[in-house]
Amino acid sequence: MEQATTILVAESDPANLEMIARPLEEANYEVVRAASGAQALGELKHTPSRFGAAILQCQLPDMNCMALLKQIKAHPLLKVIPLIVQGERNNEQAMVEALRTGAHSYLDKPVESTLLLAVIQTAVKDYLYHRRLQEEIELRQSRLNTMQAGHFRISTLDEATDLGSLIASAYPESGMIVVGLTELLINAIEHGTLEIGYQGKSELLATGQWLEEIQRRQASTQYADRYVDVVFQRLPGEIRLNIKDQGKGFDWRPYMDIRPERIFDTHGRGIAIARQISFDELEYRGCGNEVEVANF
């Protein structure tokens, strides 16, 4: 798989552009510079798979970056690229609007280089993971586009990833479906059946103990027999998928969008990503241990 270490930087001010580009190049990223929204969009469309992330100035000469965000997110080959908006300090309204429009992160001007590199590293890591899922779908020898219904049961992260690829192959837009679907299935295992909370995962990731804790819980008598049920239905004009775990549920509402207070966290974007790029409809039910998605 091509290592997408090229970063697009759309910035109209030459001095600000170099303040962003220089630390990226010193960290061995290739930087493509764009002075306008039209130029940025043209570069991205020319070679979509080249870019691991894009940094967009909030106000470009020819368009507001929110308009550029919407155009990128509407493009079938570009919408998976993490977009990082850079705007004026303490402009919470712009930050919230950018995140709701689909930005991966929002950075205040001027940005400190250590923070910039940390955000880019997380964004590129997310992108490469999603690219890998998409490429696995493309390499499948057979597709399930004739499947009308199916009931599946999973209990491990590996099974979640495998089932995500399998079911996604039943959709016309399998490459985008697999990204959000895998996120939802992993959430159901990780936060549902194994009951690892958001803060708990943050601490486990910070100490490098996340995978060890997953394995420990799956082997314990408390969680070993738990599973996630997945029901697929192809109906006239739509495909529906229901995912239900055996956990206690959670308050899903803060995770339907990327929130400012979690903007620099290394996880917690899965549900928002599923809403933004994979499914036309996403609804959690009851206590939060069941989610239904639909594509029309």
Image (cartoon, grey):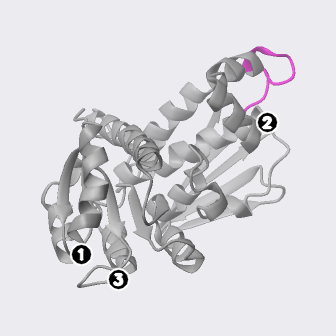
* The N terminus: image quadrant: top left
The answer to which of 146 and 246 lies nearer the viewer is 246
Residue 179: image location, x then y, percent: 45, 47
How far apart marks 2 and 1 lie (CA) works out to 43 Å
Q: Which residue is mark 3?
A: 64
Q: Earlier in the sequence, mark 2 or mark 1?
A: 1
Q: Main secondary structure of the magenta part?
A: loop
> Callout 2: helix, strand or loop?
loop
Q: Is residue 141 magenta?
A: no
Amino acid type at mark 2? Glu
Q: Which residue is mark 2?
A: 195
Q: Which mark is residue 37?
A: 1
| Residue contact between numbered discs 3 and 1, judged by CB atoms under 8 Å | no
Q: Residue at x 35, y 56 (%)?
A: 173
Amino acid type at mark 1? Gly
Amino acid type at mark 3? Asn
Residue 146: image location, x then y, percent: 39, 49
Q: How many marks?
A: 3
How far apart marks 3 and 1 lie (CA) works out to 8 Å
Q: Residues within 10 Å of mark 1 (few under 14, many from 20)?
A: many
In the figure, is residue 79 to the left or right of 45? right
What residue range appears in magenta?
218-227
Q: Residues within 10 Å of mark 2 (few under 14, many from 20)?
A: many
How far apart marks 3 and 2 lie (CA) works out to 42 Å
Q: Residues within 10 Å of mark 3 (few under 14, many from 20)?
A: some
Whether residue 53 is visible, yes or no, is: yes
Q: Residue at x 68, y 38 (%)?
A: 202
Q: Name above or below for residue 140 compared with residue 67.
A: above
- Tag in front: 3 or 2: 3
> Callout 1: helix, strand or loop?
helix
